[in-house]
Structure formats: structure tokens, C-alpha cells
Amino acid sequence: MITLDSKIPSGPVTEKWDKHRAEMKLINPANKRKYTLIVVGTGLAGSAAAASLAELGYNVECFTFHDSPRRAHSIAAQGGINAAKNYQNDGDSIWRLFYDTVKGGDFRAREANVYRLAQVSVNIIDQCVAQGVPFAREYGGYLANRSFGGAQVSRTFYAKGQTGQQLLLGAYSALSRQIGAGTVKMHNRKEMLDLVLVEGHARGIVTRDLVSGKIESFAADAVILATGGYANVFYLSTNAKACNVTSIYRAHKKGAGFANPCYTQIHPTCIPVSGDHQSKLTLMSESLRNDGRIWVPKAKGDKRPADQIPESERDYYLERKYPSFGNLSPRDIASRAAKEACDDGRGVGPGGYGVYLDFADSIHRLSEETIAERYGNLFEMYERITGENPYKSPMRIYPAPHYTMGGLWVDYNLMSTIPGLHVLGEANFSDHGANRLGASALMQGLGDGYFVIPYTIGHYLASEKTAKVTTDHPEFKKAEQEATAQTQRLLNINGKRSTNSFHRELGLLMWDKCGMARTEQSLKEALKRIPELREEFWRDVKVTGVGEELNQSLEHAGRVADFLEFAELLCYDALEREESCGGHFRSEYQTEDGEALRNDEKFCHAAVWEYAGSNNKPIRHKEELTFDNVHLATRSYK
Amino acid sequence: MKLVLKIWRQQNGNSEGKIVDYMLDDVSPDMSFLEMLDVLNEKLIAKNEEPVAFDHDCREGICGACSLIINGVPHGPEKATTTCQLHMRKFNDGEEIVIEPWRASAFPVIKDLVVDRSSFDRIIQKGGFITANTGNAQDGNTLPISKIDADASMDAAACIGCGACVAACKNGSASLFVAAKLSHLGLLPQGQPERGSRVLAMVMQMDEEGFGSCTNTYDCEAACPKEISVKNIARMNRDFFKASLFGV
């Protein structure tokens, strides 16, 4: 039975973090080297944590399944990172970033965590500049900003359309420095397969070496997971191909509560699907909505090319419905509006699942050169994928799964319900509520890694004083045997269907039944089909090759096996949350004009699921959320 | 589209490899190159054969995981494009396509088209950073940086670490990769204190890893999916001589 103690410090929200920092226990610099910490994942959160903890003097064992820590999917973030610097003198402040994030999250995030995030946002920019991140500059040499969805101030820092890449390379360089210094031992191409608990505490992990196939154990004083989100449960998403739920799901099976899995973000501006061969979807940065106008024809089934549809016959639906935020409405709202237009028969492009993102006005107002300077690389990418030139004809876009706000439940110290298991970045649930604002994922990943975990992990280690364990402990042997057995089981099935065909089928099912809009009926259908599909998988999947060498089929099969269990959890959560909020839209719960209808009386809480054994329904717990500072209100961007 | 694929198959680092022919006859011009390989792999699995191993991840041209020498050219025929962003509309119906792994002694083959590029990481670990512990930093705007310098630094920082420059070079030199990192940091004021020691340490490690020397043939720049300029190599050489002759 899990217990949820969020450990939010007392006092006003503006003082909680300072007070907590003053009260947390410390570990003497000379004693830090006696502790070993495991960090799984090398994206923004993982790399930042591993580097910062090693700088403090801890021994760090860091793991990635990639060939290099620099490949983590944080690298693909395009648009930018928010920070409450108020360099633009446009009314921004820590309070306003806090307010925007809580409101943007549709009042389903924990206020204390969000306020801390807004506080550390300013330190993140400073740290990144010091590392040599080449942020965009004004001619005077000062840092430039752009606007992003869900905010009326300009607080987004960026490096062309490659902000995630530059921030990750900054964190990777800090991590590399520690690897070179011998304080971080880096394990490339090693995938975590299980979490090991000793006397109820997270004390290590079991991994598979993806090149040799060797199953190994690693012991530590605490474990940090920074393994990203689970949007690939939809198969087609903007996530990288290898992104998966395995680490956090296996931790969930070992007792970590999983919070709000139904909060999935569907990003409004992605390149539409072109055929059955599609292996992933490509995001077009939200920053494009600064200068692009979104529209569909007013008439249903209007098949004329865009340039032959006169102005009076176009529906700029975001500008019409949300005049104050217009094309910069938050992601959940912009996505649903696109779906609505397409479901109404006014979609454009092959199949009718697309809307226009049109730059003609901006090119006319600012010149093609200026637009190229701002978005050149994105325009090129669009042309490479679609074969169409967006300077001449409008882009076609459609929403796609992009980010997952749900994740392992953590307390204020970023510790899960398993003592010693800490969870950072997208892998946890804490800061974005039911919807994440653009340019806030990078902020959270780096905030957790650079400025939160270095404080809270010391407090944990100093308070717990657990005895040392080694990998000779029987719990490690047991977990190794289970991991070996699962690998062997997958290889022995020798059925008829490929792993990919199962993943594709699951993804389509989730998109249809639990995607942008969900109903009680669709979710019950999904909950009926998922166990059948899982049973088929374990009976009929074909995994070629052997376990003792590089075997990409085997890696994929292990990840899909976990998605096939996790998908059920996601649907249970969506079914039981009988309201619409942020990225979770239940069609039964909407206002007359189609907006999300929250039910604060019954659902102003985080739903935290406890694993109850295979084929048993998980147990739902609640962490009540209170809003003392940003008062509960219907979110309006009109 | 119908295609004849000639693909390098190699069981592991210790075994001999060879080119194996595969026919593929239902390729859509809208597929990406890697999606075309996905289709091939599904067919191989159906026939109980092992699929072709290749590195890939983001499939949007930024993670640097994908590689492949396609018809003799790293990342294939389209300029400034990674393999994952290359689409089949750039090929002709009936075409024969030869697909090989990166070829360089510092990038040993692990399996089929997958190579070991950890030598790049080790070069970065020797000096590809600015020593700035978390918490050291001053306010970001206390250090104005001219837009021209910041943009030039960004152009060099755009390197994705894929290794196409090495694969394209007849000497297997990593000069463009190393020079890009040195320029990224060396063009910024933050990078100045370690500029000399950085170039010495990184160049030494590059040599130790078994990469060849640069003989200015510019194949690296032509192959680079991010169009990193060879001017960076000139800057690296200048910094290297300066640091060698006058100290760091």
C-alpha cells in the first residue's frame, strides 16, 4: 500500500524553496565521495543531474541505451526555454511564469513545485550561458527572446530552431568533463531492465548491454531515473524511435506510484501522416505560430488549392475563437480546434487530416529574408519531408502525440513512493499538470537536474543512512534472473508477427480510443482489446536472432511488451477521470462551445496508481491539490 | 518503386562482412530512407531472417545517430541532409542502391551498418567544454556577446556528431568534428580562458584515437549534413600553432 506524502514545506509559496533549502540536511564534502548514485538517462535532466552531482563530489554511474549520451531526445526540442528574466521589460516576473504555468496546466499541477520551477528558471539561463550555449542575441549583445503559446510576455530564450540541441550539448559537455575527470562512470548502450529494492529502498538496477547482451547489476545508495516520456505508446509520435516507458514502468511494478498517465499532450503543429509506412511524426516548432496564421476553408469539402481560396472564404479559426491569444493559444486548445475543423469536413490535404499554417502575410509584412532568418531550418525540413515549398504555399499541419505530463509520482524532493528512487524531467509528473506550455519542458528538465536534485538527494542520503549493499545481494541475483528469463521468453516464442506490427496496432488503438478525445465507450473498448493484444503478442511475436549480441528486434520487443501493459493503465486513468482538463479531453464533459469542462469538486487531485499484480486492476490513490495562490478558474484564452 | 539494395552484412566486430543483395518492390516515394529499410526488415523477419541493424533514433535530422554510406556518399545524395531525412523521391524506380557503414579505423563496425563512435565522446571528454560548475554563473546579460560572434558560434555548434566528415575523408580525419567544437567555444568570450589548453588536449586525443590528418580536400564539408565550414579547421590549426608555440 503506497502512502502519498508530498512533503511540501510550510509557509507562503514564495518562500517554500528558500526555507526548505535552509532546513535540508547536508553531507560534508569529504563524505560525498563515499556515496554512489545511479543516473539512468542522459537527456537534459539526466545529464544535468549526473554532471552536477559529480561536481559536488558524489560517485556517479550514468546509463544510456544510446551509443553516446548526446543522442537523448531532448536534442530534438526546437523552439526554446522559458525563464522569468523580464529582460524585455514587458511585465514578466517569477510570479507571472508561475501563474501562466499553473493556469496552462489547467489547475492540475502542484503549486509549490511550479513556483520553485519558475524561481530556478532564471538560474538555468545563467548556467547555460556560462557553459557556452550560443543563445540568440540582439545586436547590442544581449540575450534575445521570442513569444510562445499560453503567455502574453516574451520570455522564451532560443538558439535558432535547435534550442534543445544546444542545451543538451551544454549539459553533455558538463557531463563529459566529469567523465574525463573520472567522477562519472558512463555506461553507453546499456538499457535498464529492472529496479532493485533492498529492504524497501531503491538500491540499484539491472541492465542489458546492448552490444554483448550481458545482463548485469549495479548497486548504489540511491537511483535517479530521467528516462523521458511515454508518447510512443501511440506508436506514431514526435518522440524518437527508441523512447519508451520501460524504466519507469518497471519501477512502477516494483512499487512506484504512477501519476496521471492520461495526461498526454498532442502537439498542434506536426507534419501530417503521408502513408502506412510512416514510422514517426515530425514536429514543426510552436514558434512558427508567432508568424504563421492557421486556417481552413470555410466551406466543407473545399478542395481548391490554398492560393485559389479568397480571404473571405477562409476561417482563421484560432483568431476567431480566441482573439486575445489567437494563433498562440495553448497546445491542447489549438490541437482540439484543428481536430474539430477536420472532423467537420474542412480539413485540407490528402485524407482531409490537415490545416494550413500560412506565412504569406508575414512574408509580405517582413520579407522572405526575415522569415528565412527566423525559421529557415524548419522550412527546409518541411520541404525535405513533404516535397512542398512553404515559402510559396502554406504548410499543412496536424496534431500528433508529443509529450506526456503524467509520470512517476514524486514528492517535493522529487522522490517517488519508493524511498531512494528519484525521478526527474518528463519521467515524473510534477510540474505541468494536465497540459504543458511550450518551452517549459527544457526548463523543467534542467531545473530538476541542475538546481533541485543536487539539494534534495543530499537530504535523503543524510537522513536515511542506509547500510551499504553490493550486487552480491540476493535481490540483485533475483532481478538478473527475471531479466534473463524475460529475454529468453521473447526469443523462444518464435511466432508469426513482428514486434513492429504489434506496436503499430497498439498505437492506432490508443490514438483512436484514447487520443485527442476520449469517451467512456471508447476507453472501455480499448480496455477490452489491450489484454487480447497483449496475449497475442506473448503467443505470436517473432523475435529473430539471439540474446548474446546486438539485437535491435529484441530491444524493441521488450519495450513493446511494457507498452502493452502500460497502455491499460493509461486507459484506466482516462476512464476514471470523469472530466476534461488540458490534454485529457473526455467528450462527455465539455461546455456548450466545445471547451474542456473540469470538475474541480471531484477531480482536483492527482490520480496515483499502485501496481496490483499482472491482470489485476491497479489501485487508484489521490493526492489532493490545493490552489491557494492561483485561484481555480475556468481557463480562458478568449 | 522497385529497388535493388546491396547492403553490407556483418555479424559482429570479429567476423568478415559482405554485400548481400535484396529486392524491394513496393517502395513509396514519400517514404524516408530509413522507412524503406523498415519495410525491408519487416520482410526479412517474415522470412525468419535477421533484420539489418542500423543506428537511428530521432528521425528528424538532429540526434546524429543515423549514418550509412549510400552509393558511396555519407548520408546519401541530397545535400545538407541526414539519412533519416532523405526521402525515396530522390531515387529512381529500378535503381540499385549500395548501403554500407561508415568506413574508418576509428569507427569499428559493431554489426551490419552499426559502428562504434565512442572515440568522438572521448575527444570531447578531454576538453570539449567550458569549466563552469553548476551554480558558478553570473547573470546571463552581464556578458554581452556580439550577434555576429554568437551566430558564428552557433553555426559551428550545429554539429550533430554523426561522423559523416570522418567517413567522407580519405584520411579518416576527425578534423571537422573537432574544429567545430573548438570554434563553438573559442568564438565566445566564455571559451577564452581554456582556448589554448582545449585545442592541445582535443587534438592530442584525436590523434590517439587513430583518426588521420587533414589534407584540405574539403570532402568533410561537402558531406556534412549541417554544412559546417572547413574554415573552422583553419581556426583550429591557428589556435593549435599559437598554443604550441606560445603556450596556453
Image: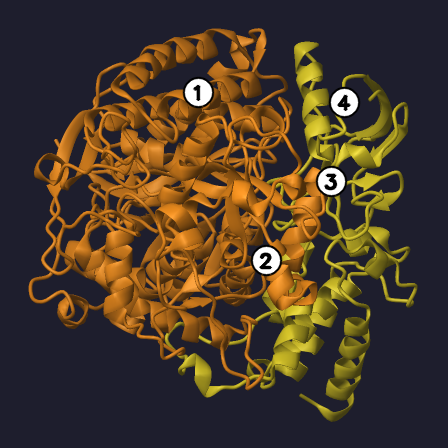
Chain colours: A orange, B yellow
Helix, strand or loop status at disc 1: helix
Q: Is residue B167 left or right of residue A557?
A: right
Give the foreground label among 1 and 3: 3
- Pick the front one: A408 or A579: A579
Would you say the residues marked 4 and 2 are in contact, meaning their CB atoms lie under 8 Å apart? Answer: no
Q: Which residue is mark 2?
A: A361
Tell me the amino acid under the disc marked 1.
Gln
Tell me the amino acid under the disc marked 3.
Gly
Would you say the residues marked 1 and 2 are in contact, meaning their CB atoms lie under 8 Å apart? Answer: no
Give the CA distance from mark 1 to mark 2. Answer: 57 Å
Mark 2 vs 3, N-terminal side = 2
Helix, strand or loop status at disc 3: loop
Count neighbours of disc 4 (C-alpha within 10 A) and say few if under 14, some if 14 to 19, many if 20 or more.
many
Chain to which mark 2 belongs: A
Q: Which residue is mark 1?
A: A486
Above or below: residue A478 compared with residue B82: above
Would you say the residues marked 3 and 4 are in contact, meaning their CB atoms lie under 8 Å apart? Answer: no
**Looking at the picture, how far across and down is residue B102, in whole percent?**
79, 44
Q: Quadrant of the N terminus of chain B?
A: top right
- Pick the front one: B222 or A491: B222
Helix, strand or loop status at disc 4: loop
Above or below: residue B69 compared with residue A628: above
Helix, strand or loop status at disc 2: helix
Give the residue displayed 49% in from the left and 63% down from the top: A171
Mark 1 vs 3, N-terminal side = 3
Q: Is residue A404 left or right of residue A580?
A: right
Give the foreground label among 2 and 3: 2
Give the CA distance from mark 1 to mark 3. Answer: 44 Å
Q: Which residue is mark 3?
A: A387
Q: Which residue is mark 4?
A: B27
**Looking at the picture, how far across and down is residue B232, in whole percent?**
77, 72
